[in-house]
């Protein structure tokens, strides 16, 4: 009888070991984050970067226009991820983005009293609502690699610029309009588009610091595609000129935490 009970116990232990070996190591909740579906994760993020404005065409009639340099940008805000499947989430947020760019134009054949040369250094600020589909790998030593793609809608809340503009005047000689101090653009809502749309693409890593906290780092590219970011012909204060359907673009490094 004792031998039979001992044999039964040994078989049970061997069976349990075999099952555990097949399924792999199952860490305790305090050793690894619990993966749950249909949950909302909230995070905080900051993102330093480089921004630039680029005309969609280099030439418009006799006028040429070009991007004349990058500007430092800075974004901060909140992130919201709704994890609706194991490796998939809808990612959104609410963020403030300080950005801008430099545009130069040249038109030797400009009409009388129009601008023959311009140098516009824009400093713009937006409140943004991004929406994206986020794909994540399974956890590997508490790391998850992610990639995401989506759209960002931005509402302009600040528009300033420094500029130097040469106005053609054959009678009195060319006039120069210039300011080295950031000046608020008040020449109508059309000077800077009140709403901007961008395509956002990003990839990065999330690292489980604890059961419920992930550190977050990513590299993102934002490509503005509509509408024309600026329309200087609507500015009643400055000489008339165009800038070739300017788009807003940026690269940024995002750093943050999910809770």
Image (spheres, helix red, strand yellow):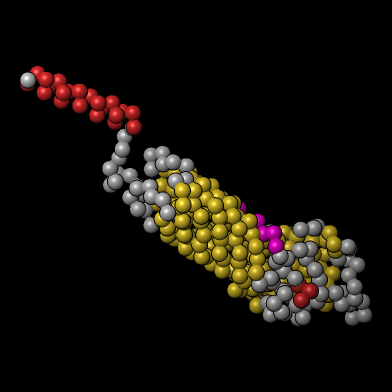
Of the pair 198 and 177, the residue shown nearer to us: 198
* In the depicted structure, whether residue 224 falls above or below residue 171: above
Q: Quadrant of the C terminus?
A: bottom left
Residue at the extreme left: 2
Tell me if I can see residue 25 in this picture.
Answer: yes
Q: Is residue 253 left or right of residue 168?
A: left
Percent coordinates x, y for residue 137 in the rendering: 47, 42
**Residue 13: which quarter of the image?**
top left
Region rendered in magenta: 219-226
Percent coordinates x, y for residue 158 in the rendering: 61, 74
Q: Main secondary structure of the magenta part?
A: strand
Query: Number of callouts in the render?
Result: 0
Q: Is residue 133 magenta?
A: no
Of the pair 35 and 62, the residue shown nearer to us: 35
Q: Is residue 145 left or right of residue 15?
A: right
- Residue positioned 61% across, 70% down in the render: 155
Of the pair 166 and 160, the residue shown nearer to us: 160
């Amino acid at each position: 009888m004792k031998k039979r009970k001992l044999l039964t116990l040994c078989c049970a232990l061997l069976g349990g070991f075999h099952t555990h070996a097949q399924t792999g190591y199952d860490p305790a909740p305090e050793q690894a984050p619990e993966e749950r579906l249909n949950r909302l994760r909230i995070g905080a993020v900051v993102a330093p970067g480089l921004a630039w404005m680029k005309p969609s065409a280099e030439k418009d009639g006799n006028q040429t226009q070009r991007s004349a340099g990058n500007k430092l940008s800075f974004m901060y805000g909140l992130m919201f991820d709704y994890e609706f499947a194991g490796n998939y989430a809808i990612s959104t947020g609410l963020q403030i983005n300080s950005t801008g760019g430099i545009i130069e134009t040249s038109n030797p054949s400009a009409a009388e009293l129009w601008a023959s040369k311009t140098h516009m250094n824009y400093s713009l600020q937006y409140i943004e609502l991004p929406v994206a589909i986020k794909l994540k790998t399974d956890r590997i030593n508490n790391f998850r690699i992610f990639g995401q793609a989506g759209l960002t809608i931005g509402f302009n809340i600040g528009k300033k610029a420094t500029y130097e503009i040469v106005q053609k005047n054959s009678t009195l000689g060319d006039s120069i309009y210039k300011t080295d101090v950031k000046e608020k653009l008040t020449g109508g809502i059309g000077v800077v588009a009140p709403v901007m749309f961008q395509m956002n693409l990003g990839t990065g890593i999330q690292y489980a610091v604890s059961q419920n906290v992930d550190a977050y780092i990513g590299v993102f590219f934002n490509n503005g595609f509509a509408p024309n970011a600026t329309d200087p012909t609507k500015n009643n204060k400055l000489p008339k000129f165009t800038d070739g359907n300017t788009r807003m673009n940026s690269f940024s490094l995002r750093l943050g935490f999910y809770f």
